[in-house]
Image (cartoon, rainbow, N blue to C red):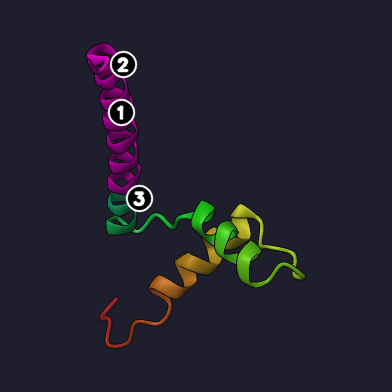
Amino acid sequence: MADLGGMARDLGRDLGRDLAQAGRYLTQSLRLMVGVPDYGSYLAHHQATHPDREPMSYEEFFRERQTARYASRTGKCC
């Protein structure tokens, strides 16, 4: 007979991991919706694609993202 207690623990552990991952995705999505750039994703991408280059500091990254978001708009009245 299978160990039901062990199966329940495994299921609970898997569910906990899945909920934690869903929470991270939700947090990332909400930050992107309100315009907060994701520095962690930038660092992971930079390490994977440009390992020979020094990544921007958080401050440089934030300024670059703000400039990219707001400075390129045309037709603004203000």
Write down the residue under mark 2: 6
Residue 22 against residue 4 in the figure, above or below: below
Residue drawn at point x = 29 percent, y = 55 percent: 34
Kindly indicate the quadrant of the structure image that contains residue 5: top left
Nearer the observer, disc 3 or disc 2?
2
Q: Is residue 13 located in the magenta-colored stretch of the structure? A: yes
**Alpha carbons under labels 1 and 3: distance apart:** 18 Å
Label 1 neighbour load within 10 Å: few <14, some 14-19, many 20+: few
Give the residue type at disc 3.
Gln
Q: Is residue 18 located in the magenta-colored stretch of the structure? A: yes
The C terminus is located in which quarter? Answer: bottom left
Residue span colored magenta: 1-27
Write down the residue under mark 3: 28
Element type where label 1 sits in the image: helix
Nearer the observer, disc 2 or disc 1?
2
Element type where label 3 sits in the image: helix
Kindly indicate the quadrant of the structure image that contains residue 49: bottom right
Residue drawn at point x = 75 percent, y = 70 percent: 53
- Place of residue 11 in the rendered image (x, y in percent of width and height, measured from the top left): 26, 26
Give the residue type at disc 2.
Gly
Nearer the observer, disc 1 or disc 3?
1
